[in-house]
Amino acid sequence: MAGLRRIIALSFVLAIGFLLVILSCALYENWWPLFVVATYILAPLPNAICSRFDHTYDVLSMGNDNQGIVDAGQFITGIFIVTGFCLPSVLAHNEIITYPAMGMSIAGGLLVYGTIIAYTHFFSQQSEDTI
């Protein structure tokens, strides 16, 4: 039952995050901040793809030779996350969007990324406990 409450709370926070990004576009009649949503979608993908190589272990080499691939995936994920925060700042600095729209877009990004991190934290712990 506690897992269901966590999912409901996380989905509520995620919806508020997306609502802030959409409101930053609709209230100020400028749809450029909507490009931040693309970074929300693309950010977890490199980490998810490259983490599949983490589970291979070669007995003859006595180590994990694929750590570079995992690190590269985490680096690319970090690039997308930084882009999600810096894109509204650059758009506001160039006066393409207003500063309140920038603030709403960054706040929505914080909520969305926080939800993703909380989801992976809660449910990766739960799967480790069952082993």
Image (spheres, rainbow, N blue to C red):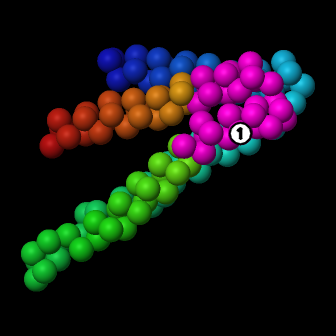
Residue at 84%, 35% (x, y): give it. 96
Quarter occupied by residue 101: top right
Quarter occupied by residue 28: top right
- Residue 10 in the image: state x and y as whole percent: 48, 23
Quarter occupied by residue 58: bottom left
Residue at 71%, 39% (x, y): give it. 90
Question: Total number of numbered labels?
Answer: 1
The amino acid at mark 1 is: Val
- Residue 126 in the image: state x and y as whole percent: 25, 33
Residue at 47%, 49% (x, y): give it. 78
- Name of the residue lying farthest toward the bottom: 60
- Residue 29 in the image: state x and y as whole percent: 90, 25
Magenta stretch, residue numbers: 82-109
Front one among 107 and 42 = 107
For the stretch drawn in magenta, what is the main secondary structure? Answer: helix
Q: Note whether residue 52 is visible.
A: no
- Residue 87 in the image: state x and y as whole percent: 68, 41
Residue at which label 1 appears: 90
